[in-house]
Image (cartoon, rainbow, N blue to C red):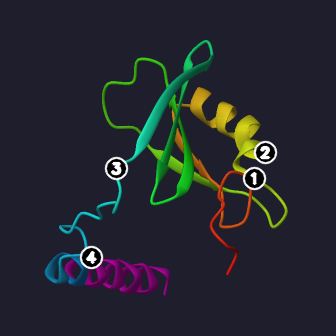
Amino acid sequence: MIRALLFVAALLVALCSLAAVVTGVFSRPVLASTPATVLDIPIEPGIVLRSATVDGIPLDVFTPAGLLGPAPAVVLAHGLDGSKERMFAFANALVRSGFVVVAFDFSGHGDNHNPFP
């Protein structure tokens, strides 16, 4: 029974992956309508913070210092009354574990001055 369920799950993943490739989901880059403004800030030894604004959305990208190749990534989203600054402690811990971390502000929160829908 478990093997049958695993087979069905693997088949579904394969079909979804094939559909994504055929429809071009993975081949179409998403381009920002305005150039990003980027500022590199070393926040503590071993961690680099890149602050950027893309399409009016402020982003903070935390990377291990000296990162040269690909690394797993985590996107941190704040709560209803929060901002990306509240995610710094989580980001630091994740970067020290080898992740690249992206934190952003939802509309109407923190540095994002776009109106809240």
Q: Name the residue under label 4.
A: 17
- Give amino acid for label 1: Ser
- Give amino acid for label 3: Pro
Residue at image position (49%, 81%) is 2
SS under mark 4: helix
Q: Does the magenta stretch include residue 6?
A: yes
Quarter of the image with the C terminus is bottom right
Q: Nearer the viewer, mark 4 or mark 2?
A: 2
**Looking at the picture, how far across and down is residue 56, in whole percent?**
51, 58
Give the vertical position of 14 relative to 46 (above or below): below
**Looking at the picture, how far across and down is residue 38, in whole percent?**
44, 36
* Mark 3 vs 1, N-terminal side: 3
| Alpha carbon distance from label 4 to label 1 | 34 Å
* Mark 4 vs 1, N-terminal side: 4
Left or right of 28 in this view: 109 = right
Instruction: Give the image quarter of residue 113.
Output: bottom right
* Mark 4 vs 3, N-terminal side: 4
| Residue 86's disc number | 2
Residue at image position (20%, 69%) is 28
Q: Mark 1 points at which residue?
A: 83
- Give amino acid for label 4: Ser
Q: Which of marks 3 and 1 is in front?
A: 3
| Alpha carbon distance from label 3 to label 1 | 23 Å
